[in-house]
Amino acid sequence: MNQQLRSLGRAPCIGCQRRALVVRNVAEAVRPVVASTNGKARVGVPEGTPIVTPQDLPSRPRRNRRSETFRSAIRESIVSPANFILPIFVHEEGSNNIPIASMPGIYRLAYGKNVIDYVAEARSYGVNQVVVFPKTPDHLKTPTAEEAFNPNGLSQRTIRLLKDTFPDLEVYTDVALDPYNSDGHDGIVSDAGVILNDETIEYLCRQAVSQAEAGADVVSPSDMMDGRVGAIRRALDREGFTNVSIMSYTAKYASAYYGPFRDALASAPKPGQAHRRIPPNKKTYQMDPANYREAIREAKADEAEGADIMMVKPGMPYLDVVRLLRETSPLPVAVYHVSGEYAMLKAAAERGWLNEKDAVLEAMTSFRRAGADLILTYYGIEASKWLAGEK
Ligand code: PBG
């Protein structure tokens, strides 16, 4: 029989071919064949299941997938609450948490007890890292965003509150001017509509130092100005904060997926006026979503300037860039599962179109598989509950 099968590869005569079709598997034959069961009913398979000769297949990857025990024994990527950094939005316009319409389940937390309670819950599930985003009232916003380095600003007070309450919590900050800038940009906007690079960096340095003074463990420049990591490193060191780390938003793309975040902080670019042009988007400083190699350039700069952690943002649409940084640098890699990605999953889950738990944990696993050590995600608490086996 084997002899016969083997000879088939060598253009046999028409008669041989017809006879051979009876014994060849469908997968090997050009046309499907229904093999006879010789009248005997077969047990354990549905009637109509074809009888075939086993494939001569030394490598069968399915052997390694046969049981959950074995699958979990050989799993390559593991997600743990230890990988998560939980973003928190803080406000002080009243004492209630304020829901964010485009991010169901996420709130602007009222400064004080509500912030503490939320972080305490996260810690109870093993999430011990947070990043603080303040909602600045409009009357404190200016074109030069001085509120960013107010030693008693909401951001600085929140950092202090968190570190006083939970000394071993890792507190990350955002370094960028947009939540404090009346123009809604990460840097200072000139009258001609240019986002000023070096002038902005002066204020980013003051902001980072003020956050370090408040007790921040890691400052995270998300502004995408050139040279800001080095400048912030020098400013921190000059002030004695050599132990404060920098997590750089290394490859931050000009993405449509930040929409809900800008709703949360009311921080989107504002409309311009006749005498002051305000760019409607951030494309002159955030990266073009079409670019891959450019991320290498950013990564080299950040490494040389003293970044401790490099981040890619957004997450799911940019897993190739996560893998790129993983392979081009020995620094830990973080990925930001951004507000729009959260909103998409929530929206589909609310409609019953996706199994939320499975879809979210699959996303988290994919970040780890792509090479991320750290994952910034609004699902931090929920995903940790699911990982702990809760419904
Ligand atoms: C501010 C900043 C943004 C995000 C994090 N830091 C918004 C932006 O760049 O416009 C987005 C986070 C998210 O969408 O979840 N520079």
Image (cartoon, helix red, strand yellow):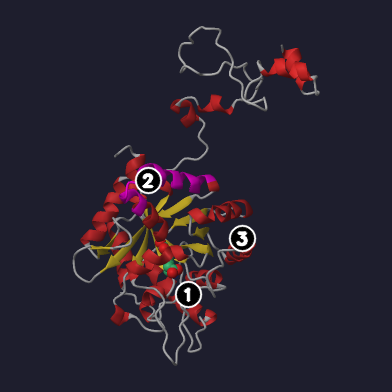
The spot of residue 62 in percent (x, y) is 55, 27
Name the secondary structure under disc 2: loop
Residue assigned mark 3:
292
Badge 1: few (under 14), some or many (20 or more) residues near its Cα, within 10 Å? some
Earlier sequence position, callout 2 versus callout 1:
1
Dominant SS of magenta comes to helix
Q: Is residue 160 magenta?
A: no
Q: Is residue 355 visible?
A: yes
Question: Are the two marked residues, 3 and 1, in contact with CB atoms closer than 8 angstroms?
Answer: no
Q: Residue flagged by tag 2: what amino acid is it?
A: Leu
The spot of residue 391 in percent (x, y) is 29, 39
Q: Is residue 364 magenta?
A: yes
Earlier sequence position, callout 3 versus callout 1:
1
Q: CA distance from mark 2 to mark 1?
A: 32 Å
Q: Residue flagged by tag 3: what amino acid is it?
A: Tyr
Residue at x-position 44% and y-position 52%? 375
Residue at x-position 55% and y-position 18%? 50
Q: In the visual, does 8 lie left or right of 103?
A: right
Q: CA distance from mark 2 to mark 3?
A: 30 Å
Q: Residue flagged by tag 1: what amino acid is it?
A: Asn
Residue assigned mark 2:
354
As displayed, is residue 105 above or below residue 38?
A: below
Residue sitting at the far left: 95
Residue assigned mark 1:
281
The spot of residue 85 in percent (x, y) is 40, 54
